[in-house]
Amino acid sequence: MNPAKALQLDRRQFLAASTATAATIAGGLRPSSALAEPSSGNLHLGTFRFDVTPPMGHSLCGGWITPATAVDDPLEAIGYVLLGSGKPVVVCVVDWTGLLNSAHLRWRQALAEAAGTTVDRVTVHCVHQHNAPFACLDAEEIVEAQGDLPHIIERDFFLRCLDAARGAVRQAVQQTTPVTHVAHGEAKVDKVASNRRIIGPDGKLVSQRGSSSKNPEHHALPEGLIDPMLKTVAFYNGDRKLAACHYYACHPMSYYGDGRVSADFCGLARRERQRQEPDCTHLYFNGCGGNIGAGKYNDGSKAMRPVLTERMLAGIVASEETLERQPIESLRWDTHDILPPVNPRFDAEALLRQIHDRDQRVVNRNRPSYTVAWIRRMNARLPIALSSMHINDISLLHLPSECFVEYQLRAQQAAPDRFVACAAYSDGGPWYIPTAEAYPQGGYAVSVAHCAPQVDPMLSGAIRKLLSVDEAAPRVG
């Protein structure tokens, strides 16, 4: 099959695969589904993992940093399939910078097909390392038409990853293990996360601390608003731990831009925990870390990567030490779609002129292609899918893109009687998702945010609805 044709996805296909239809979107917000799921005492879980390391010469982080010249450590996609409560549920996390728009949907479709489920019961997230692919098929089409720009994502490589995904999930479905218990725990991570946005006395952003900084003033400033807790949710067969999902909100880069592919400190911590517990599949999800980085504690030197890795590993181990198993009594999957308006500061025609301008730097031509892709998507009214899985008193919340940490903290406040773990960086189409109050403060994240400030009440409302779990949740057993 022609790779270009294999990746084509028109509006009708997108809408058919999405959980929303244009007729059910009111004001950009679709009511949360509360589909009754059959009771079952036959929960089974299968895990999968496969390699997604790009070939040498492949673009990293969208093509505006050094392409892949070496592999310090491989990139993986890791996930699980949960069977026995309605249609199968698939959860996957990928060591890539992002999966955006139709690229994200293509992953969900491939996993759904392999698991024998529907796309609305699949969630795919990225860890957001930067020496990794940043996949947007729609942006790739725009830059490829220029003839002189580096790829966003190479089609053959993307299709190989989808084939690997299908194969891994099909095998997982054939090799499942009964699931009887679930557990949750949390622990503080020391000296990793700090807020990236330094706000001055006038309420405006005066400095961005970033994922690393050599500025002593950045190191001296307080951490700012973060979520210091790493959360873990684990699945068991009796007392045997099958899978452990770890959630923490922070940009996961120690250093990048040198062409050396790496899962970086969060991925390396996960891999070390996997080595320590080879019979349990460990997954790491980046929470709402859009405005969070390691800049207070990280000077960007190579020596800091193992230090940050050890701190993350210590947090993972400490979180798991607090796990207490409980029999699974109820399980429910909910979805909610939003259709946020485009940030009015962007004009597609002006951006296309910039992309066409060969006097511009590559970053000033490649990066706007993502914005044009988003504008076209919103013009076609193709929504963002959110979802949640509720197991007993645990809620796993699946959010898009680079949400600010405030959304994660709001989620926890919205369900104080539940253990809420947030996985962000699913569909990366919106890019950063600041809070409404952050827009007038200014700064980098606001300047590149694809959505208008109205995204805040839409997303916050969707989070509240996804966490509104009534007592009629489907029982298991």
Image: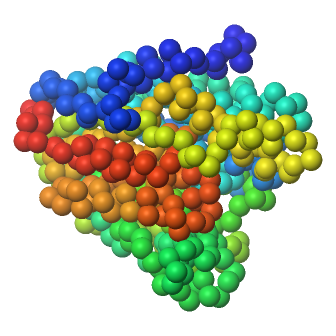
Q: Position of residue 273 (x, y in %)?
A: 45, 59
Q: Nearer the viewer, residue 198 or 36?
A: 198
In the rendered image, which quarter contains the N terminus?
Answer: top right
Against 308, residue 11 (above or below) is above
Q: Residue at x 48, y 57 (%)?
A: 434
In the rendered image, which quarter contains the C terminus?
Answer: top left
Does the image show residue 171?
no
Judged from this view, the residue extending furthest toward the top is: 1
Against 115, residue 413 (above or below) is below
**Residue 16 falls in which quadrant of the image?**
top left
Q: Position of residue 330 (x, y in %)?
A: 14, 39
In the picture provided, is 321 more to the left or to the right than 215?
left
Q: Nearer the viewer, residue 290 or 117?
A: 290
Q: Nearer the viewer, residue 99 or 318?
A: 99
Q: Position of residue 350 (x, y in %)?
A: 75, 41
In the picture provided, is 184 more to the left or to the right than 263?
left
Against 25, residue 321 (above or below) is below
Give the image's coloring scheme: rainbow
Against 257, residue 452 (above or below) is above
Q: Position of residue 294 (x, y in %)?
A: 56, 71
Q: Residue at x 44, y 64 (%)?
A: 437
**Residue 368 falls in which quadrant of the image?**
top right
User: Disc count in the image?
Assistant: 0
Judged from this view, the residue extending furthest toward the right is: 359
Q: Residue at x 7, y 41 (%)?
A: 471
**Residue 263 falls in which quadrant of the image?**
bottom right
Q: Residue at x 87, y 41 (%)?
A: 357
Does the image show residue 64?
yes
